[in-house]
Image: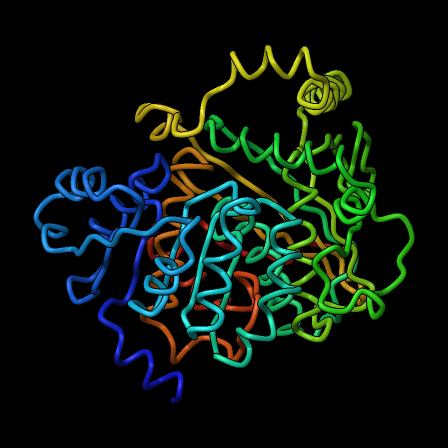
Amino acid sequence: MSRARRSAERNLDIVLFGASGFVGKLAAEYLAAHAPASVRIGLAGRSPERLAKVRESLGKRAATWPLLQADSADRASLEALATSTRVVSTTVGPYRGRGLALVDACARAGTDYTDLTGEVLFIRETIDRCHDAAVASGARIVHACGFDSIPSDLGVLLLHEAAQADNAGDLGRTTFVLKGVRGALSGGTFATLKGIVDDARRSRTLRRTLGDPYALSPDRSEEPKLGDERDLAWVTRDNELGMWLGPFMMASFNTRVVRRSNALTGWAYGRSFRYQEAIGVGGRFTSPLIGAGVSAGQAGLATGLAFGPTRALLDRLLPKPGDGPGEGTRKTGFFKIDIHTRTSNGAGYIATVAAQGDPGYAATAVMFGESALCLALDKASLPERAGVLTPATAMGPALVKRLRKAGQTFTVKRVAA
């Protein structure tokens, strides 16, 4: 049976799995407010009672949305979920412990899939176990459809498109700089961080994978050898950019996603494409001190989570899974990112990605909701790809168009050499 025929026979267009969780509710609210009335949406989770309460809170547009009972530990329920809809969007994490069976079900059923994972090891597993099945069925498995890693992935894609349009050559040294941010972390984010720390402590093989800049490559042996590409670990002065940079805690994930995008497109960005992510840390005199504080804080958190006594203390102090920032924090949050590149022909470009709203929640709800709508509604304008993909390789310009229309900033300008 063809993918087109299977899609036409599905009862639903989008199912949101984990709709009663903290981030799931935000995604449901976004879809209820912005999805066209013709889009058939369902809410899924373990508890029909909790799902019903979420649906009641969404207003009249969601009143008829069906509720589907499914559990990440019940493979049969996940298979039923995958065959009921054209797109599954899941917020149920940490994904490495709870998400692989759903990816497998979608890959075999030819169902498109999105999530909000920030876990390198989870994506590596889905590539190894599910990529070929997804290619065969035509499923697009699209990880990291939130603040991790849409700004990074689509921002670099825009740089590539601008350089190609100007016949300016391949992308060379490319640096993501977080210029400003206001937001908070949820209990789910800390649960993910603890899982990553535990994996690194448990296995030397997993530590090597986590430290590999090309951990998500479709063919590691084909990747270019560009020297030291380790993520920034301490404050440093970037003389070319004229600023101080500090380590960005999401760099060890986002950079792998962007490099996978390059490889999946046949290294379209260039074989000498070098990519790093950092935080811009302020003015001329205060920057080294601020950057050192950022570096020490991130290193201290990782050390604290790895050491038993401090881990126990942090467990009492940090938000629990299901907790997250309040509405005021979500509304007043924001982020602004500049991504700088110099091409092989010497041309310079800056892509700016920015949005109002807490990056991990309000802004992510927009990205996540529009990703699901893009897969469900924009088939004709999507790249002809299937398998375990990235936002840039699965949706690319179609998703950029949607996010701009939703009020987020995605721009590129050429700068003097």
Q: Is residue 411 above or below residue 306?
A: below
Residue extending farthest bottom: 1
On the image, the x and y values in percent for residue 179 come to 59, 35
On the image, the x and y values in percent for residue 191 come to 54, 31
Q: Is residue 263 above or below residue 406?
A: below
Along the line of sight, which residue is nearer the eye, 163 or 77?
A: 77
Q: Is residue 69 above or below residue 138?
A: above
Q: Which residue: 40% across, 70% down? A: 111
Q: Which residue: 51% across, 68% down? A: 394
Quarter containing the C terminus = bottom right
Along the line of sight, which residue is nearer the eye, 343 or 65?
A: 65
On the question of residue 284 being in view, the answer is no
On the image, the x and y values in percent for residue 335 come to 49, 36
Q: Which residue: 76% across, 19% down? A: 292
**Left or right: where does residue 192 sit relative to residue 407?**
right
Q: Which residue: 45% across, 61% down? A: 400
Along the line of sight, which residue is nearer the eye, 344 or 135?
A: 135
On the image, the x and y values in percent for residue 151 come to 54, 50
Quarter containing the N terminus = bottom left
Colouring style: rainbow
Query: Based on the displayed image, in which of its 4 quarters is residue 239 positioned?
Result: top right
**Left or right: where does residue 98 sit relative to residue 251?**
left
Query: Based on the displayed image, in which of its 4 quarters is residue 380 positioned?
Result: bottom left
